[in-house]
Amino acid sequence: MATHKLLLLPGDGIGPEVMAQVEKIVGWFRKRGLGFETETDLVGGSAYDAHGKAISEEAMGRAQAADAVLFGAVGGPKWDGVPYDVRPEAGLLRLRKDLGLFANLRPAICYPALADASSLKREIVEGLDIVIVRELTGGVYFGEPKELVTLENGQQRAVDTQVYTSGEIERIARVAFDLARKRRNKVSSSEKMNVMKTGVLWRQVVSRVGKAEYADVELEHVLADNCAMQLVRNPKQFDVIVTDNLFGDILSDIAAMLTGSLGMLPSASLGMEDPATGRRKALYEPVHGSAPDIAGKGLANPIAMIGSFGMALRYSFGLVEEADRLEKAIANVLASGLRTKDIAAPGTNAVGTKDMGEAIVRELEAQS
Ligand code: NAD
Ligand code: IPM
Ligand code: MN
């Protein structure tokens, strides 16, 4: 039996609450004979409280050695005052950078049962199935200089730097084109070439890769501000959207609301394939954060976290049938009318995190 080594990093706020539900799903697959081995470690504010930094060297070593990392969420008001370099979010950024996770896939699917849960009209979102491919290890998140200094005149000055090389753009473009070929064959590339040099380079490189290697895939260019508007106006025009680190962060929160809630959006962060083994480093995380406003109340929707494990089944372990089964279980539970508060119609009954997790496990059981 193949062994799959999973590192669980629940993190802060609702992170541990939603991760506890994934552990039940992992347990169910283990009972069915799949060889999952799990380890758990600290990240974010909880790691800062224990070690004075957002992730320990030991946890980094475990992440490097794991077949896949499952990540909950980090951050919260408790750590607002900690030094910038050790703030909770630094743990996540270090994982992305050190594991080389340059490709972040953020699928936004509107489950049929949730077409009325979005803040947009049913006909705008019904049947929606798009993927945002976000570049994750470059751009303004990591560009140097990055500083906040006090000037001689007493004013302060802050600098962030957006940097991209053609190589970084080429590799993320290929991820988007390859994905589009397995879907509806269309890539929308989003930047701001009208004001940014990185945008000019982005458009040039994506066009060149498209023409030379993917002439069969339709390619369009959409300025990022227009892309945000189009996502709300008519999101079904898109198939795969490829964009930089910061625009991808913002566009994916917009896309989340098309599915009903931020609590619905999973993601996969993938590294380069090792040509010798065919394997890639990978981290799976919901798009949402630690939700301090509902943390500790048992109200969080665990579907984004459970769906992220579904992506791990598919992308890290090649367990396509199991991934399909898990997605079907989620769809069936939603079709049965069960709702956490974020996706329930106002004034209707909602269940908690644990009830939703357990209903999905029961549905997996019922399917087999
Ligand atoms: P957030 O995503 O934590 O929450 C935004 C809103 O969405 C809140 O009202 C929250 O209650 C709701 N929400 C989020 N996830 C939900 C879920 N699963 N079920 C139901 N409702 C859900 O964003 P924020 O409030 O801007 O950030 C809070 C903290 O989280 C910050 O410290 C931020 O840096 C951090 N953050 C972390 C990650 C991550 O760890 N990947 C992602 C985003 C934000
Ligand atoms: C996300 C989050 C992170 C980001 C933060 C927590 C660093 O918002 O994964 O979407 O900005 O990438
Ligand atoms: Mn974000």
Image: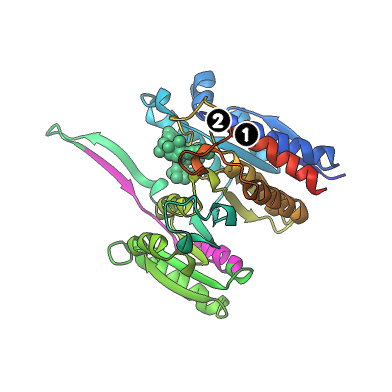
Q: Is residue 51 above or below residue 101?
A: above
Q: Is residue 136 above or below residue 350?
A: below
Q: Are the residues at dot 1 and dot 2 in contact (C-beta closer than 8 Å)? A: yes
Coloration of the structure image: rainbow
Picture coordinates of residue 219 (x, y %)? 48, 74
Q: Which residue is mark 2?
A: 11
On residue 204, the disc is none
Q: What residue sits 63% from the left and 28% below the top? A: 41
Picture coordinates of residue 271 (x, y %)? 60, 52
Q: Residues within 10 Å of mark 1 (few under 14, many from 20)?
A: many
Image quarter for residue 276?
bottom right
**What's under tag 2, amino acid-wise?**
Gly
Element type where label 1 sits in the image:
helix
Picture coordinates of residue 5 (x, y %)? 74, 39
Q: Is residue 18 above or below residue 242?
A: above
Picture coordinates of residue 243 (x, y %)? 45, 60
Disc 1 from disc 2: Cα separation? 9 Å
343 relative to 2 in the view: left or right: left
Q: Foreground: 232 or 355? A: 355
Q: Residues within 10 Å of mark 2 (few under 14, many from 20)?
A: many
Q: What residue span does the magenta drawing correspond to? A: 157-179
On residue 19, the disc is 1
Q: Is residue 253 visible?
A: yes
**What's under tag 1, amino acid-wise?**
Met
* Quadrant showing the N terminus: top right
Q: What residue sits 25% from the left and 35% below the top? A: 149
Image quarter for residue 27?
top right
